[in-house]
Image (spheres, grey):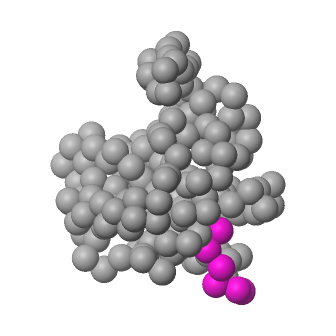
C-alpha cells in the first residue's frame, strides 16, 4: 500500500499556472463555480445553495486530505494569482495504487488549455511522486470538452456504464477514462 505524506502540501508549478492548496480565501471563486449552471452541468452533485456550504466543503476537503482520501488543488494563474478552478485526486485507493481525477473551472477560462496543463502537472506528480499505478476519470458521456482534455493527456476510454448513477430523479450514464503509469 502507498504511504503518501501530505503534511507539507505539494505546490505544483507549470508555465502558466500555480496549483496550490485550496483555502477559505477561495470562498468567492468556489461559490461562483459551484452555483454556475454551466460549470455544474456535467457534475452530478447538487448546486451549492450558500457560502456556508462552500466553507463546509473546503473544511471537508482538508479533512479528507488529512485522511489521505484526496488531494485538491486550487488552479491559479501564475502572473495574476487569480484562482480559475480546482483539480485533484479523489476517491484515492492507496491499497490499489490508484486515484480518480476531477476538475472544474470558471467558464471564461475554458478552451485556453489551462485544465490540460493542470492535469498534466498532477498526473506527473501522481505517477512520479505519489507512485500511483493508475489514474481514472469518470464523466458524463456528453462532456466532450473533458474527454478531449483527457485524451490530450494520454488517457484512454475504457468503458461506458449505462445508467449507473442516480441523480436529480434520473439515471445517468458514466464514461470511464484511465491512464496507467507505464
Q: Is residue 182 visible?
A: no
Which residue appears at 71% of the width and 86% of the height? 79
Boundaries of the magenta span = 79-85
Residue 41 in the image: above or below residue 87: above
Could you tell me residue 77's position as x and y percent? 67, 77
Tell which of 129 and 119 is nearer to you: 119
Tell which of 20 and 107 is nearer to you: 107
Residue 120 in the image: above or below residue 174: below
Tell which of 16 and 51 is nearer to you: 51
Tell which of 11 and 182 is nearer to you: 11
Which residue appears at 51% of the width and 75% of the height? 26
Label count reads: 0
Q: Is 116 inside the magenta-drawn segment? A: no
The residue lying furthest to the top in this view is: 162
Please indicate whether residue 64 sits to the left or right of residue 26 in the image.
left
Which residue appears at 45% of the width and 72% of the height? 22
Q: Is 84 inside the magenta-drawn segment? A: yes
Please indicate whether residue 111 sits to the left or right of residue 182 in the image.
right
Could you tell me residue 129's position as x and y percent? 38, 65
Determine which quarter of the picture holds residue 70. Answer: bottom left
Please indicate whether residue 4 sits to the left or right of residue 42 in the image.
left
Could you tell me residue 1's position as x and y percent? 19, 49
Which residue appears at 52% of the width and 13% of the height? 162
Q: Is residue 63 visible?
A: yes
Could you tell me residue 176's position as x and y percent? 52, 29
Residue 80 in the image: above or below residue 111: below
Amino acid at each position: 500500500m502507498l504511504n503518501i505524506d501530505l503534511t507539507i502540501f505539494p505546490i505544483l508549478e507549470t508555465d502558466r499556472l500555480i496549483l496550490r492548496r485550496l483555502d477559505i480565501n477561495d470562498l468567492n471563486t468556489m461559490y461562483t463555480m459551484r452555483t454556475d449552471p454551466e460549470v455544474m452541468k456535467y457534475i452530478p452533485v447538487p448546486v451549492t445553495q450558500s457560502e456556508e456550504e462552500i466553507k463546509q466543503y473546503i473544511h471537508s476537503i482538508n479533512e479528507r486530505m488529512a485522511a489521505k482520501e484526496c488531494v485538491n488543488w486550487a488552479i491559479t494563474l501564475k502572473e495574476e494569482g487569480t484562482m480559475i478552478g480546482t483539480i485533484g485526486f479523489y476517491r484515492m485507493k492507496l491499497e490499489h495504487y490508484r486515484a480518480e481525477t476531477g476538475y472544474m473551472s470558471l467558464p471564461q477560462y475554458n478552451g485556453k488549455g489551462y485544465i490540460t496543463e493542470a492535469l498534466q502537472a498532477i498526473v506527473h506528480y501522481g505517477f512520479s511522486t505519489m507512485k500511483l499505478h493508475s489514474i481514472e476519470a469518470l464523466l458524463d458521456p456528453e462532456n466532450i470538452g473533458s474527454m478531449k482534455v483527457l485524451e490530450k493527456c494520454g488517457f484512454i476510454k475504457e468503458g461506458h456504464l449505462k445508467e449507473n448513477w442516480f441523480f436529480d430523479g434520473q439515471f445517468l450514464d458514466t464514461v470511464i477514462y484511465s491512464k496507467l503509469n507505464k
